[in-house]
Image: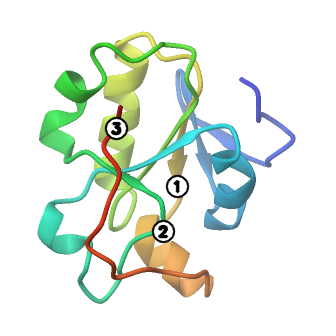
Amino acid sequence: MIFRGLMGGRQAAPGYEDVPPQQIAALSERAWLVDVRETSELTDGLGHIAGVRHVPLGQVAAAFADVDRGQPIVVICRSGGRSGSAARQLVAMGFEKVYNVEGGMMGYNWAGLPVSHDPTLRDVR
């Protein structure tokens, strides 16, 4: 994996790493940042990360069916559970560089990192 060691991530399960919220900026320079929460959650109190791609958890398999398996993907949700599930799905689909944000948006907010409440989001493609 391209960020192992460099980003301080830890192997969470075969095929993906958990990374702290503070590492998102460095990861997103080369990886897609994908929020797997439901649409209504993206503009709630936790907000979302500016520039994130939105793919609800139930749509991950379909949304990533035609995406290059070498594309690095960083997944985030509210607390890390759904994004962990998305990470496992992506690994099962053959993605090689998958990262799950520890603590999700709760951890991201707790770390004092910038959030957006803008409803304009990017498609996964």
Alpha carbons under labels 1 and 2: distance apart: 15 Å
Disc 2: CA contacts within 10 A as few (<14), some (14-19) or many (>=20) = some
Question: For the residue labelled by badge 3, is the local secondary structure a helix, a strand or a loop?
Answer: loop
Expressed as whole percent of the image width and height from the top left, the position of residue 39 reads 16, 63
Residue shown at the point (52%, 22%) measured from the top left: 14
Expressed as whole percent of the image width and height from the top left, the position of residue 65 reads 27, 15
Task: Give me the disc on residue 101.
Answer: 1
User: Disc 3 designates what residue?
Assistant: 124
What amino acid type is highlighted by mark number 1? Val
Alpha carbons under labels 1 and 3: distance apart: 18 Å
User: Residue 85 is drawn in which quadrant?
Assistant: top left
Question: For the residue labelled by badge 2, is the local secondary structure a helix, a strand or a loop?
Answer: loop
Question: For the residue labelled by badge 1, is the local secondary structure a helix, a strand or a loop?
Answer: strand
User: Disc 2 designates what residue?
Assistant: 50
Alpha carbons under labels 3 and 2: distance apart: 14 Å
In the displayed structure, does residue 30 sit left or right of residue 93? right
Residue shown at the point (37%, 29%) measured from the top left: 88
What amino acid type is highlighted by mark number 3? Val
Disc 3: CA contacts within 10 A as few (<14), some (14-19) or many (>=20) = some
Expressed as whole percent of the image width and height from the top left, the position of residue 77 reads 34, 59
Disc 1: CA contacts within 10 A as few (<14), some (14-19) or many (>=20) = many
In the foreground, 86 or 55: 55
In the displayed structure, does residue 41 sit left or right of residue 87? left
Counting residues from the N terminus, which is met first, the one under dot 1 or under dot 2?
2
Asked if labels 2 and 3 touch by Cβ distance under 8 angstroms, the answer is no
Residue shown at the point (47%, 13%) measured from the top left: 68
In the displayed structure, does residue 91 sit left or right of residue 73? left
Residue shown at the point (52%, 55%) measured from the top left: 101
Asked if labels 3 and 1 touch by Cβ distance under 8 angstroms, the answer is no
Q: Quadrant of the C terminus?
A: top left
Closer mark to the observer between disc 1 and disc 3 = 3
